[in-house]
Image (cartoon, rainbow, N blue to C red):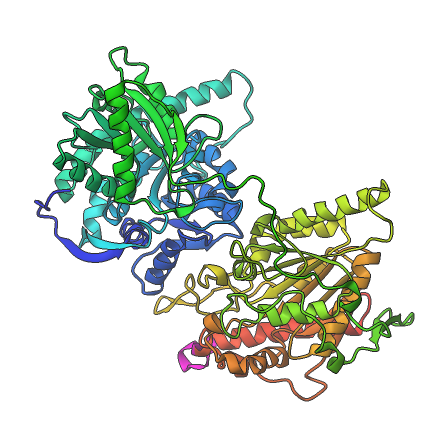
């Protein structure tokens, strides 16, 4: 990077890569951003939303119900002929992956920031390149941003290259999760957005869906040879991008003083051995080269700033004098004898008949494992040995990893709970009133429940006052016998299963947000089939429970509805804490109206979340499963009785859905010592009414109105920092709207309670 030598004034600040991507987005002023939170890319949407609240841009921000939905939002917006932006990571990218070739195949530009992260499983949220490498064949231009400065610059360049008339392709800008995304550096950006907008130019739409005079068909069905011709055209567009990028880099360099190239090298001119390494590790490796050069060793470094279009000729030129090249991949193409960069470099260099470079692969840094200068020194020394000997002894290996003891037998960390000591006392019973259709639970004593062993033990890493575990343990008091629990990704699984520890005394399974219900339904049916075949004793039994929360019934709602329609014999327990808490409290569809989150900021141009909370219990009740109920820890006896009914219905009739209000004092902004009162206030104002839907019949189990305990919703909202602003005079309209909606839903629930056919 050189000093700025331009008249276009720039501001010097200290910011992270995510923040700089957001600054670029603000100055570009995209038409639409579709988004969904996932670590470590979430800060981009959070920062753009905060700027939105402050009136700094006009981008329409649309929260998806998951990354797949967010990608669909972006594609739909792009077909409308405008500028579109998104950011994602890891499994979020994988979930949206089928949308990527649709976007490129129909030639609608947009910009997607991929903040790299290892994808599951097992779950790991730290940075490597396993997600990025899945995009190589998607038809997207891929630019790399190794530091926060490039996080800004490459986002601007991305718009310019993607919208070239002969290109018209979507663009990925990729930075390393946590290494670049969260680390702050000294950076510069243009003081005036007009400088950026002048560089990228006005948006010129091609064919689009909003031209009434020229209707078009987008994405038609194609037979052969139409599709192969389409892909040929896409290939030509990528070739056009290859031709255009050097000129765009040159133009941007004159504007900013920062000129980039397709391939970046360091001390490569006379090098005999070199290391190829991408993104944030490049600067670490530079220090190793400097150290070895002082020892008189001729080593160098190279990297690609652009992965698509592949800088074929530049790499051949850069490697022409090398005797040995170590390719360090932060991803493995399993059984391919190297990661994707190794395979592509080998294929490239063999096309040059003059090249005699010995290439070998080292896999490093998976799951965010740190890469140190000493690691780079070791790789360069290894390359020097190959250069001297002319032989590669070890073509492919991992750096700093072990296969472990293959004969290791894990010991049980926690003693399982004897079946006889689990669940309610034997004298409890469930009696169904044939007149009303309501099942009553008798013989349950709260005092007796306090001595029951916990299936989830103490020692987890949850925040003080977290409501998840009081909810979970209270629910499990009503469940007798053997239990298998499946947890979707969220706070509850993160704080209980940090490898190699566990907090569970029962069998535990994890799967991702979007597929928990489907996963557990598969296990339920395997259990039933093995019993039918006589492979499991007939008297063996389990209660299967899926635990979801932290927004899991946004992205996971589709599979949940599918599971409900199939009516598997299992329980879904949703702890509703009203946000994506495990990623730092972003807005969920269950977040209360007008609440403040990191993606629904409060400011002069935006007053928190702009739509009402999703009633998941009523949505699932509409699928006509046998039993749906809501519970709250402030009413423990009602809670445990409903758990007992849930077990009975799941064992005899099919799917059960239980929704619990769950406190999160860290993000709700209230006092953990008063959390039970906050929960009670949420129930008493009827924001979270307690009821059950049994065989289609609605029964309100706690009626604050009849008990003369019903309170205005403002009494609850003022107890929490996330909604306390609503009692201020300037938010009177939002408070009135909130109260009206709560009253409307309560009156509808009462009508269902009073009329069994509703």
Residue 110 position in % (x across, y down): 38, 40
To which quarter of the image does residue 284 belong? top left
Foreground of the two, 111 or 327: 327
Residue 694 position in % (x across, y down): 80, 65
Foreground of the two, 204 or 260: 260
Magenta span contains residue 730: yes
283 sits left or right of 365 in the view: left
685 sits left or right of 301 in the view: right
Q: Is residue 145 visible?
A: no
To which quarter of the image does residue 244 belong? top left
187 sits left or right of 43 in the view: left
Quadrant assignment for the N terminus: top left
Magenta span contains residue 17: no
Find the magenta span and give its range.
725-733
Residue 376 position in % (x across, y down): 27, 38
Foreground of the two, 32 or 551: 551
């Amino acid at each position: 990077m050189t000093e700025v030598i331009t008249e276009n004034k720039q501001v010097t600040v200290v910011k992270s890569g995510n923040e700089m991507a957001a600054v670029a987005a603000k100055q570009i002023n995209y038409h639409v951003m579709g988004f969904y939170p996932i670590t470590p890319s979430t800060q981009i949407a959070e920062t753009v939303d905060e700027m939105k609240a402050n009136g700094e841009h006009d981008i329409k921000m649309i929260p998806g119900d998951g990354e797949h939905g967010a990608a669909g939002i972006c594609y739909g917006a792009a077909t409308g002929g405008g500028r579109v932006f998104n950011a994602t990571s890891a499994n979020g990218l994988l979930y949206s992956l089928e949308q990527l070739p649709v976007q490129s195949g129909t030639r609608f530009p947009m910009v997607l920031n991929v903040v790299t992260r290892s994808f599951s499983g097992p779950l790991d949220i730290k940075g490597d390149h396993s997600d990025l490498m899945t995009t190589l064949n998607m038809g997207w231009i891929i630019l790399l941003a190794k530091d926060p400065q490039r996080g800004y610059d490459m986002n601007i360049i991305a718009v310019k290259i993607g919208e070239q008339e002969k290109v018209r392709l979507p663009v990925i800008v990729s930075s390393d999760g946590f290494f670049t995304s969260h680390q702050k550096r000294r950076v510069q950006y243009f003081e005036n957005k007009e400088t950026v907008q002048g560089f990228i130019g006005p948006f010129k739409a091609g064919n689009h869906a909003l031209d009434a005079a020229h209707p078009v068909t987008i994405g038609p069905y194609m037979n052969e040879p139409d599709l192969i011709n389409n892909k040929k055209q896409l290939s030509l567009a990528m070739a056009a991008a290859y031709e255009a990028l050097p000129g765009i880099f040159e133009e941007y360099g004159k504007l900013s003083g920062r000129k980039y190239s397709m391939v970046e090298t360091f001390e490569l001119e006379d090098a005999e051995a070199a290391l190829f390494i991408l993104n944030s590790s490049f600067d670490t490796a530079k220090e190793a080269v400097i150290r070895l050069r002082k020892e008189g060793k001729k080593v160098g470094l190279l990297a690609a700033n652009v992965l698509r279009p592949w800088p074929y000729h530049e790499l051949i030129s850069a490697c022409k004098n090398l005797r040995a090249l170590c390719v360090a991949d932060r991803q493995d193409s399993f059984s391919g004898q190297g990661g994707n960069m190794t395979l592509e470099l080998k294929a490239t260099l063999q096309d040059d008949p003059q090249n005699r470079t010995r290439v070998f692969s080292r896999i490093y840094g998976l799951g965010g494992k740190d890469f140190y200068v000493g690691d780079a020194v070791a790789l360069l020394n290894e390359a020097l040995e190959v250069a001297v000997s002319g032989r590669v002894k070890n073509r492919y290996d991992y750096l700093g990893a072990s296969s472990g003891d293959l004969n290791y037998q894990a010991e049980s960390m926690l003693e399982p709970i004897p079946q006889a000591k689990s669940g309610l006392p034997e004298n409890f019973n469930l009696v169904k009133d044939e007149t009303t259709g309501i099942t009553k639970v008798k013989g349950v004593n709260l005092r007796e429940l306090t001595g029951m062993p916990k299936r989830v033990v103490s020692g987890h890493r949850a925040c003080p006052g977290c409501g998840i575990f009081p909810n979970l343990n209270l629910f499990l008091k009503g469940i007798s016998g053997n239990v298998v629990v499946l947890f979707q990704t969220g706070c509850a699984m993160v704080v209980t299963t940090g490898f190699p520890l566990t907090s569970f005394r029962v069998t535990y399974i994890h799967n991702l947000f979007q597929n928990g219900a489907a996963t557990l339904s598969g296990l339920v049916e395997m259990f039933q089939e093995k019993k039918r075949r006589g492979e499991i004793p007939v008297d063996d039994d389990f209660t299967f429970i899926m635990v979801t929360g932290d927004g899991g019934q946004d992205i996971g709602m589709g599979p949940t509805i599918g599971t409900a329609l199939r009516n598997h014999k299992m329980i879904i327990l949703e702890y509703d804490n009203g946000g994506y808490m495990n990623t730092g409290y972003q807005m969920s569809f269950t977040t209360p109206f007008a609440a403040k989150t990191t993606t629904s900021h409060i400011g002069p141009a935006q007053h928190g979340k702009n739509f009402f909370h999703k009633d998941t219990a009523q949505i699932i009740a509409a699928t006509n499963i046998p039993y749906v109920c809501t519970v709250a820890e402030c009413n423990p006896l009602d809670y445990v009785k409903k758990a007992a009914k849930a077990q009975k219905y799941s064992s005899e009739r099919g799917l059960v859905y239980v929704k619990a209000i769950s406190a999160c004092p860290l993000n709700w902004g209230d006092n953990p010592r008063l959390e039970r009162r906050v929960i009670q206030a949420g129930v008493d104002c009827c924001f979270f009414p307690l009821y059950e839907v049994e065989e289609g019949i609605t029964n309100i189990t706690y009626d604050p109105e009849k008990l003369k305990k019903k309170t205005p919703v403002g009494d609850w909202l003022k107890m929490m920092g996330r909604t306390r602003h609503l009692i201020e005079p300037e938010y009177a309209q939002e408070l009135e709207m909130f109260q009206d909606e709560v009253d409307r839903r309560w009156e509808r629930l009462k009508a269902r309670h009073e009329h069994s056919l509703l």
